Amino acid sequence: GESVGLHLPTLSVQEGDNSIINCAYSNSASDYFIWYKQESGKGPQFIIDIRSNMDKRQGQRVTVLLNKTVKHLSLQIAATQPGDSAVYFCAENRTGRRALTFGSGTRLQVQP
Amino acid sequence: EAGVAQSPRYKIIEKRQSVAFWCNPISGHATLYWYQQILGQGPKLLIQFQNNGVVDDSQLPKDRFSAERLKGVDSTLKIQPAKLEDSAVYLCASSSPQGTGGSVEQYFGPGTRLTVT
């Protein structure tokens, strides 16, 4: 069946280091991918998105990479800060279907 | 711009009781979603509204869950009767459509944490 999943449940990094969070998807029909950040007690917050006709997209301190050949998505956070500590979800969407399919999440812990 | 509002924030009920959650989306957002997020998992769509019509309720357990959006703005999600496995955070999200098939950003509310004992 189709799924959006993550490789690592918990990622611990030192403050100032770069973080990389990975995500695999199985539905080749997926054409839009989003990364969300969820802090404790809050709803998911949009970070960055990418369409399937792109390989890379950059935001402020964040970069999303998409490898359609192996159905892999990654989120890179530069100079990780304590405020980046949260659970990160990748989600996918297909043209014609607005609702998102979420993966199970990766917890990012930033050590001071 | 005010965000998506949800109430209550927390609710504890016994199994077989009923509960209702309320959501007020961002003003002007025609699309409203209810997601269920079980602890340690990603959100799972329960139902999607476009204005006051249902677009997708394929994953809604209709024997016990119901939702409505009568005037195309606020929405309520009800569970009757609740089961232990319904313990989760119920998230409401809204988005503004950008044409057919467009991918749009969804804005989430803080959620309602339901505990069924």
Image (cartoon, coloured by chain):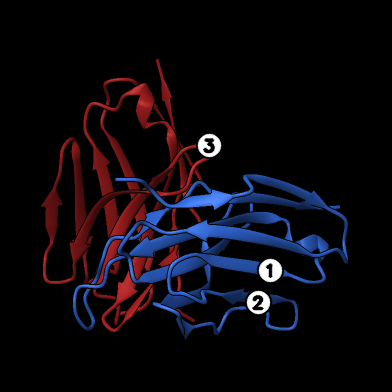
Chain colours: A red, B blue
Q: Which residue is mark 2?
A: B66
Check contact, mark 1 vs mark 2: CB within 8 A. yes
In the image shown, does B66 or A82 lie closer to the viewer?
A: B66
In the image shown, does B84 or A26 lie closer to the viewer?
A: B84
User: Is A84 displayed left or right of A8 in the figure?
Assistant: left
Asked which quadrant contains residue B101, the reply is bottom left
User: Is B39 displayed left or right of B45 in the figure?
Assistant: right
Q: Is residue A98 above or below residue A102?
A: below
Disc 1, SS: strand
Kind of residue at badge 3: Ser
The label nearer to you, 1 versus 3, is 1
Q: Earlier in the sequence, mark 1 or mark 2?
A: 2
Chain designation of label 2: B
Asked which quadrant contains residue A68, the reply is bottom left
Q: Which residue is mark 1?
A: B78
Is residue B42 visible in the rendered image? The answer is no
Chain designation of label 3: A
CA gap between label 1 and label 2 equals 5 Å
Q: Which residue is mark 3?
A: A40
Kind of residue at badge 1: Lys
The quadrant of the rendering that contains the N terminus of chain B is top left
